[in-house]
Amino acid sequence: MRVCRQWKFAVLHTGRLWSKIRLGGLESSPSQQRRVDGYELCHTPHRLKKILTFAADAPLDLVLAFPRIESSKELIDTLRTSNACFQIRSLLIEDDWIQNHNLDGFEFPALEHAVLYYSSPSLNMQIMKSAHRLRYFDLAQVGKSEHGLDFTNVLSPLELKLRLQNCMHADFSVRQTICSIPHLIRLSLYALAVPDTGTLTFPTLQSLSLHNVRLGCNLACPSLKELCLFHSSIPTKRDHPLILPSLACLKLEDISDADCAHIRAGSIDTLYLSHFQYDTRRSELMLETLLEEAIKPGYLHSKRLHLYAVSIDTHLLFDILRQMNVLVEIHVTGYVQLTKPFFEALAGCSLPVKSALSHAAPICPYLQVFALALRGTTLQTRPYVASWFKEAIEIRGKEGYPLKEASLQESERGAWVHLL
């Protein structure tokens, strides 16, 4: 395809069009393929030099996937001699080639986003020293000689993700690493154990996600707005509850009822509970604990409730909704045998309505979104469930309690009943 001279000049002199570069990888792709997912594919130093010339001084998004190509060392040398490392804005390392090679002479003053599936002590140190603008750092591996990472030189607010389950040695200190960050705003830890060596204090932390983590020490997070616990444990000493005055969103997945009861929050806006379907009794105990905690303002004033993959008795669900009466959104996915009294409470009257009777105020009068995805329920054999649901929603609308969205789904068959 031929283009005019002006168009060709504009393309070749617009650096940001050439600033996404992928070194190596995709060896099975045709040799004539030059671009993959928006990235310029470079297998040779000659092509890399050409792309860097076109990119000029534009910030670079670099993917190192090369390893098993013969020119990998030459590609690194080309980056070093061209000083392109000073322009790298984002860095993604997908292969372990980097572990056997050093990046001496590299500095990353423009680096803002780094995802390192493989790394080396020298690379980590060079990033820590020079990447003052770093905002996101995702690390999946540390060297045996590393005892911790030092983020002291990182001046920007940082989001840190540590996924070291397959490579972390006993001498590596998670505590030393995260405490070295001047302005940590988001922290995600995966498959780690943090021993009890005193309270961890994070004055600027806004979001904390723990995935399969054993947390032995207490936390002090006055600015924390979001807490996610996925199959994790926290200290449950009665005299040292986890106090989170600014918490707005709480996500709990497959944790104990003791951990649930240990959290003390000011006013939670959004509450998620999920993955208790494998143990019906445990699911009910967890939700009963939630109901007991509802007398506290933190749960009582939640506006959005999400129950995913839970087994729940319809009477318990009704009690929860009655206690949390200011809910605006309800999303329930799981094994729920809904009964007629539940929908009557939702409507505020008996069903079906045969005469003009006075209606009581329905539960959750501020409700705007109600979404049900049922498991273990066949709507074809129990069509009255859908009719109850539809009639309850219609009555709410007529009585001045309209919903913006209402849906009923049989999740195993994918059958939806869209009401609004």
Image (tube, rainbow, N blue to C red):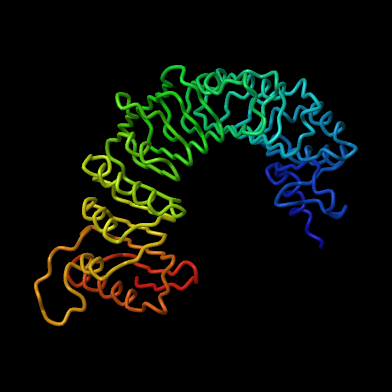
Residue found 38% across the figure and 54% down from its top: 307
In the displayed structure image, the side of residue 127 where residue 248 appears, left or right: left
Left or right: 88 with respect to 420? right
Residue 149 position within the rendered picture, expressed as x and y whole percent measured from the top left: 60, 21
Q: Residue furthest left?
A: 358
Q: Residue at x 68, y 21 (%)?
A: 126
Q: Measuring from the top left, give residue 202's x and y in whole percent.
A: 42, 24
The quadrant of the picture occupied by the C terminus is bottom left
Quarter of the rendering containing residue 264: top left
> Between residues 207 and 230, which one lies in front from this camera angle?
230
9 relative to 317 in the view: left or right: right
Locate the N terminus by quadrant: bottom right
Residue at left 70%, top 21%? 144
The answer to which image quadrant residue 103 occupies is top right
Q: Nearer the viewer, residue 97 or 272?
A: 272
Give how far across and how far down residue 33 sits, in percent: 82, 54
In this view, 190 is above or below 37: above
Relative depth, front residue between 82 and 417? 417
Asked if residue 283 is positioned above or below residue 103 in the image, the reply reads below
Res. 379 image quadrant: bottom left
- Which residue is the extreme one toward the right? 70
353 displayed left or right of 179: left
- Which residue lies at the image location 77% right of the left edge and 31% below the top edge? 98
